[in-house]
Amino acid sequence: MFEPYGFRKIESRHYFSDDPARIAKLPTHPMDKSAEQKTAVHVPKDANFPIPPYLPDTPLVRRDLWKMYNNLAETDRQVGAVLEQLKQDGLLESTIIFFYSDHGGPLPRQKRLVYDSGLRVPLIIRYPHAAMAGMVDDQLVSFVDFAPTTMKLAGMDIPEHMHGQDFINNGLQQRDYIHAAADRFDGFTDVIRAVKNKRFKYIRNYRPEQGYYLPVEYREKIPTMQELLRLRNEEKLNPAQAQWFRGSKNVEELFDTLSDPHELNDLAGDPAYAKELKMLRQEMDRWLDEVGDNPALAEKDLIKRLWDGQDSQPTTKKPNVKFKQGLMTLSSDTAGASISYKIINNNYESPVWHIYQEPDHCARRRKN
């Protein structure tokens, strides 16, 4: 799901990835729009879809939601095209397919926040021959689990330094909690941590004096955001819609995500939930200590730590390039460095960067 100035239509290049002439006609920049994208979007009068309570029910908001749902339908068609291509290539029944998005909803009070509207993503796994089709698994899964899970599927061992875990063949070792953090929002910063079990979400705000809403330029272009700001300035938002614009935050927040899925009713001050608050507070402290996260660390100190104590940003050494028997070999004297490359052939520079792995994965040197 994209978040640019009106949800640009999902790329069509997957439909004809083998047709350079058609690909060349597609926009090359996310802000560019095709003729189809520039046309007005009209919501049918009989269109019926839910509007989150934290968004106003106005024509502009309904239009953005209509675009979002149409993008979901378009995604479904494009995934179908990818599956058909795998089938034609004879690879479908030897491929495990993971489908997920990179964040929750693209609308205001969704992406960039640690509410479930910003954290929850779809996850669909398709096994060869549609094994376990239709099965629903309600265990907690975090993005850090994707790498170790796919490594295990490939028969590899999970490195000890990985924080994630295999969520497919994990037996009784399923997660009790997932954790989240929010720090940087383009030109703005905040410090928020969250932990969640299957029912309750605990949020800790390290800058309670700072409101949740930040005027992120990218988001300000969305019509729904403009509508929220207009109604805020006119004092026409209801309490649920106005929550995001509070001038400060509670240090701790607690939500029952089953009975309050939009996380509008903070239970942190309710004595009836003191047990849940304490349990999740302790889990967050444990996790922060385990991963070495110090939310109070100043930005300049964090950068210096990331730079291994140096005052200037470290750089990798120039890659070593060797040719042998028509193959190009790349290496680096910087430990742990990844090498990427692109191919320039007959004055055509490929827009795609490739991760270097082995010489036989690189292009043979051409003689002009």
Image (spheres, rainbow, N blue to C red):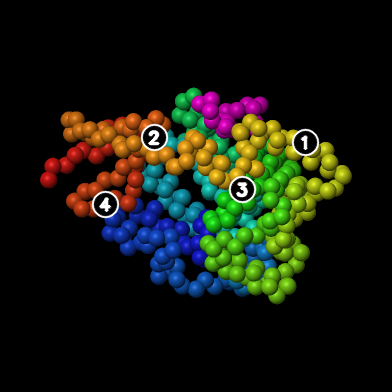
Q: Residue furthest front?
A: 311
Secondary structure, mark 3, is: strand
Of circles 4 and 2, the one toward us is 2
Numbered disc in front, either 4 or 3: 3
In three-dimensional space, the C-alpha distance between marks 4 and 3, rounded to whole angstroms, equals 37 Å
Circles 1 and 2: CB distance less than 8 Å? no
- Residues in magenta, as a range: 159-176
The residues tagged by marks 4 and 2 sit, at their Cα atoms, a distance apart of 24 Å
Q: Amino acid at mark 4?
A: Glu
Dot 4 corresponds to which residue? Answer: 349
Q: CA distance from mark 1 to mark 2?
A: 41 Å
CA distance separating discs 3 and 1: 21 Å
**Residue visible at 49% across and 24% down?**
157
Q: Position of residue 14 (x, y in %)?
A: 39, 53
Label placed on residue 182: 3
For disc 2, the marked residue is 337
Crowding at dot 2, Cα within 10 Å, few <14 / some 14-19 / many 20+, comes out as few
Residue drawn at x 39%, y 30% as measured from the top left: 335
Viewer-proximal residue, 339 or 157? 339
Per the model, the C-alpha gap separating discs 1 and 4 is 55 Å
Residue drawn where x is 71% and y is 55% of the image: 209
